[in-house]
Each structure stands twice: as C-alpha cells, then as structure tokens.
Amino acid sequence: MTNQPAPPAPLTLGDCAQADLPGVQVIYAEAVRTGTASFELAPPDLSEMRARWEKVTEAGFPWLVARAGNRIAGYAYANTYRPRPAYRGTVENSVYVDAAFRGQGVGRALLGALLARCEAAGFRQMVAVIGDSQNTGSIALHRALGFRDAGVLRSVGWKHGRWLDSVEMQKPLGPGDTTPFDGLPGDRPQGQHSGGAAPDDPPNRP
C-alpha cells in the first residue's frame, strides 16, 4: 500500500482576529521582501501589523482571512480610498496570498467576499492600486471579478533595482454612480464612516 499525500485542508473565510495576525504578518513580510506588489521596502513587524489591523477594523472596514487548517492562506481588507469626506463612498482593497497557496483560488475567494461585504455596507466603488504593471496575477484576478483598468502611473516606484508602475483598477458596487449617494448608514455629520475616523494614510497603498 502506497502512501498518498493528504488532501489539502478545506479553505474557510472569516474576519481576521488578533490571533491571525502572526500569519498575516508572515505573508506580508514575504511580499515586501521579495515582491513588487507593495512599495514598502522594510517589512513591518507584528506590532506594526497589529496597529494597522486595529486602525482599519476600528474604522468599520472589513479585514478577512482565508484559513487552511491552522494556517493563514491569505488575507484581504478594504480601507478608505482617501480621507476627504467626499470620497466616503469609495474603498480601496488589498489582497495578499501565501506563496504556497497561490493559484488555488484563494485570492479570488477573498476578493469576492470582500466585494460582497463592501457592497452590503453601502459603498459604491472599489479601487485597486496594484504595484508593478508586471504583476499579471493580481491584474488578472481583478479583471476576472469585474474590475476595469482606470490608469497607469508610469515609473513612480523604485524597488529591487528597477522602476515600477502603479496600476489603478476600479469596480462599481451596487448602483455605482447611477443614483445619488446620500452617505453610508450611520454616517457621521462630517462624512466619516460610522465605525470610526478613517485612517489618514491607508496601509494598503503599495
């Protein structure tokens, strides 16, 4: 009788808890060190990742993780696109997948769930700011889920010895721009998201 490899653990999606942050930090640190999706040059430590998670979730935005058994296979979150109140109907996404789980539908599952959560919350547009026009996997993922190209900023980043573009993509949520926007449920008078003040510097920006 030959030994067969164990089947992969089923993937489950859920809200990111503090206990998930070590796995999240490992995924992002690898992306910063070896990739070009993020324009950060030094990986943030666990304490910094915890602070970013708290800032995003306390502002009322979703931060999701994909779990495969006891391992974090990937994560995705939405954040304010810009801090000015008129932008409050628009969010920006961030999606990162553990290298061992890429090509298995993890990113698609996470982004799909994130889109659904943001649409249900009343947001009207989701923007993706993707580091590096050669990041074909992320660009293809967003196109597959209905994002359209919105523009490319050429050679705005320098990392790993080369100039990098910043690719912007966009997808309408719900009615998009076909109806007036009266704000999100529970909006504060100044137009901030009801969960708390929007972070001034979105940590998901490449």
Image (tube, grey):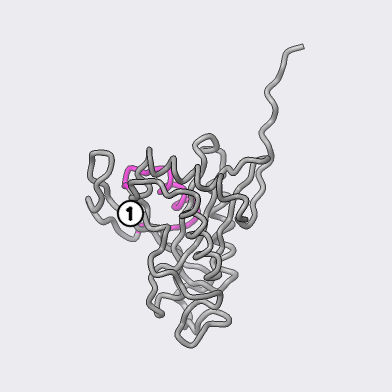
Q: Secondary structure at mark 1?
A: strand
Q: Quadrant of the N terminus?
A: top right
Q: Which of the 4 quarters of the picture holds residue 23? A: top right
Q: Residue 94, image x and y in percent? A: 46, 55
Q: Which residue has dot 1 on it? A: 167
Q: Is residue 128 above or below residue 136?
A: below
| Category of crowding for the residue at label 1, using alpha-carbon neighbours closer than 10 angstroms: few (below 14), some (14–19), many (at least 20) | many
Tell me what residue is drawn at x 23 percent, y 45 percent.
Answer: 163
| Closer to us: 110 or 190 | 190
The residues colored magenta run 132-149
Amino acid marked by disc 1: Val
| Closer to us: 160 or 172 | 160
Q: Say whether residue 88 is left or right of residue 9.
A: left
Q: Which of the 4 quarters of the picture holds residue 159? A: top left
Taking the magenta stretch, the answer to whether it contains residue 140 is: yes
| Closer to us: 157 or 113 | 157
Q: Residue 39, image x and y in percent? A: 33, 50
Q: Residue 137, image x and y in percent? A: 43, 43
Tell me what residue is drawn at x 37 percent, y 52 percent.
Answer: 130
Q: Is residue 16 above or below residue 4?
A: below
| Closer to us: 108 or 42 | 42
Taking the magenta stretch, the answer to whether it contains residue 36 is: no
